[in-house]
Amino acid sequence: MAMMDNAHEATSELNQLQIQIGPIPEEIGEFTLSYNLNLSHNSFTGKIPASLGKLIHLESLDLSRNKLTGAIPMQLANGLIFLSVLNLSFNQLVGQIPFIKQFATFSENSFKGNERLCGFPLKSPCSHEEPRLSPPTYEELHSNSGTGIERNYISIELGFVFGFGIIIGPQASYVLEEMEDMVL
């Protein structure tokens, strides 16, 4: 409970923080127990830190009315699966809005005022000149490639065989003993 209180206090302090200029620090991703983050109405510059995607318990994220630039990090869309409120409006974001997981549920209001953002839910389709965010590659999603996957399959198979043997083995032994007694 103390950790939750500390996370709540840290979140409350961040919500009231009025930093006048500069980038959002990458260390923000270390507040992993946060569930609400409001950094709106500051003068944050630079890109949205990909480390925000580590805030897996986050339910509300408001970065509106800053001077944030660049594309929306795919890590944000992939990591924030409990996000129910998102406000990235009135920044200087560019590129295609990720259309995966929770990001596919947000309305146009979450992104308005970013002239160079495109794609759903905005009315402006993406052209080939706009920077596009491609979905993560298989290698990016699965850091264990090749033998790691094979080991997973082997582990599952071995677990099944041993589990099956533990359950069926004693019963099969009992049936064989009964059949042996009937023959004799």
Image (spheres, helix red, strand yellow):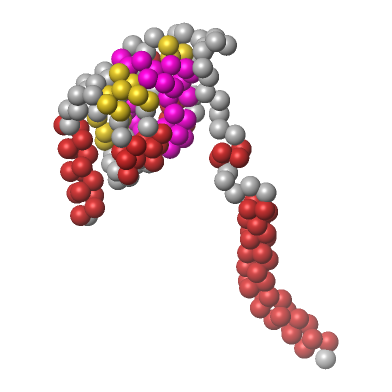
Figure disc tally: 0
Residue 15 appears in view: yes
Q: Residue at x 42, y 24 (%)?
A: 72
Residue 139, horizontal then vertical, whole percent: 60, 40
Does residue 141 appear left or right of residue 28 in this picture? Answer: right
In the displayed structure, 130 sits above or below 173; it is: above
Residue 93, horizontal then vertical, whole percent: 39, 18
Residue 82 appears in view: no
Q: Quadrant of residue 122?
A: top left
Does residue 40 appear left or right of residue 115 in this picture? Answer: left
**Quarter placement of the N terminus:** bottom left
Q: Residue furthest front?
A: 22
Q: Residue at x 47, y 8 (%)?
A: 124
**Quarter placement of the C terminus:** bottom right
Q: Residue at x 55, y 40 (%)?
A: 141
Q: Residue furthest right?
A: 183
Residue 18, horizontal then vertical, whole percent: 17, 27
Does residue 163 appear left or right of residue 47 in this picture? Answer: right
Q: Residue at x 17, y 37 (%)?
A: 13
Front position in the image: 127 or 80: 127
In the displayed structure, 76 sits above or below 149; it is: above
Residue 163, horizontal then vertical, whole percent: 62, 68
**Magenta span covers which residues?**
69-98
Q: Residue furthest bottom?
A: 184
Residue 95 within the magenta-colored segment of the rendering: yes
Residue 163 within the magenta-colored segment of the rendering: no
